Image (cartoon, rainbow, N blue to C red):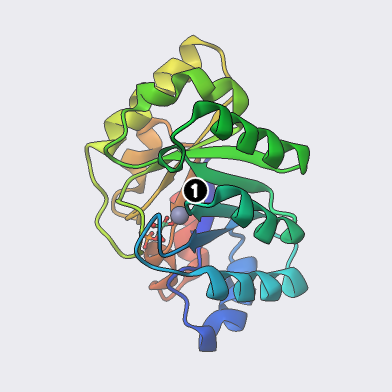
Amino acid sequence: MVEISTSILSVKKDNIIKTIYNLETAKTDYFHIDVMDGDFVENNTTEVMLEYCDYLDSITNIPLDVHLMVSNVRRYIDMFLPYNPNIITIHFEAFKDKNELLDALDYIKSNHCRAGISIKPNTNISEIFDILKYVSVVLVMTVEPGKGGQKLITSTLNKIEELHRYIETNKLDTVIEADGGINLENVSDVKEAGCDIVVSGTGIINSDNYNEVIKNMKL
Ligand code: DX5
Ligand code: ZN
């Protein structure tokens, strides 16, 4: 059974408190926090995501799954550590130097969070094989990072399959997470490809029954 990480990127401020309670009741496994800095990607969601993390901190114990789409990775890790996230994911493409990437992953783990690496649709999965031993989670982007409500890029499912095969063959315990454009219509393809954690934003938030959608996504 997959876990569901609901992205609250598309939730309007007027609805955030009600939505957090409803998603908690609907048993989302994580809240997916999409942090964008306006540099690595065009949008900037930093202030809103910090505000939403304040609400989450006072309302629920459901784990936070923080997705950093940022260039100054260390600065943003420090910004979100106070919320004790379960997972902090950084982007492979945010680093020119592999040692700096490994240092950032170490820093996340030294702060008792699971370290995740995310790759954009155009990055080959084989580029991260040599760092799988340093991460708990690989976040395979199934859309171009930067906004919610996009259509899943079908070719990215082959990357999940290839990664799943590599993990099985090498007996790694790395978790595969998929993120972007996932909904009830395509979630079975994502699961068949080998995904363990499904991120969904509009596929859940725009529905009129969070319970039903999350339950059916997990089946
Ligand atoms: C895109 C984000 C995704 C996105 C998911 O940059 O990383 O988490 O918000 O939202 P949907 O499911 O609507 O694509
Ligand atoms: Zn995300």
- The residue carrying mark 1 is 218
Give residue 60's position: percent from left, percent from top. 73, 68
Placement of 102 over or under 180, stated as above or below: above
Identity, as a three-letter code, of the amino acid under mark 1: Lys
Closer to us: 83 or 3? 83
- Disc 1 element: helix
Q: Is residue 192 left or right of residue 112?
A: left
The residue drawn where x is 46% and y is 52% is 199
The residue drawn where x is 56% and y is 80% is 16
Crowd tier of the residue under label 1, counting other residues whose Cα lies within 10 Å: few below 14, some 14–19, many 20 or above = some
Closer to us: 213 or 38? 38
Q: From where the camera sits, is residue 29 visible?
A: no
The quadrant of the rendered image in which ligand 2 is seen is bottom left
Closer to us: 186 or 105? 105
Placement of 52 over or under 169, stated as above or below: below
Give residue 20's position: percent from left, percent from top. 61, 73
- In the picture as drawn, the residue positioned furthest to the bottom comes out as 14
Give residue 8's position: percent from left, percent from top. 50, 68
Give residue 86's position: percent from left, percent from top. 69, 48
Count of marks placed on residues: 1
Placement of 197 over or under 80, stated as above or below: above
The residue drawn where x is 55% and y is 34% is 101
Q: Quadrant of residue 183?
A: bottom left
Closer to us: 29 or 135? 135
Q: Is residue 46 left or right of residue 122?
A: right
Q: From where the camera sits, is residue 198 visible?
A: yes
Q: Quadrant of residue 123?
A: top left
Placement of 178 over or under 59, stated as above or below: above
The residue drawn where x is 68% and y is 76% is 55
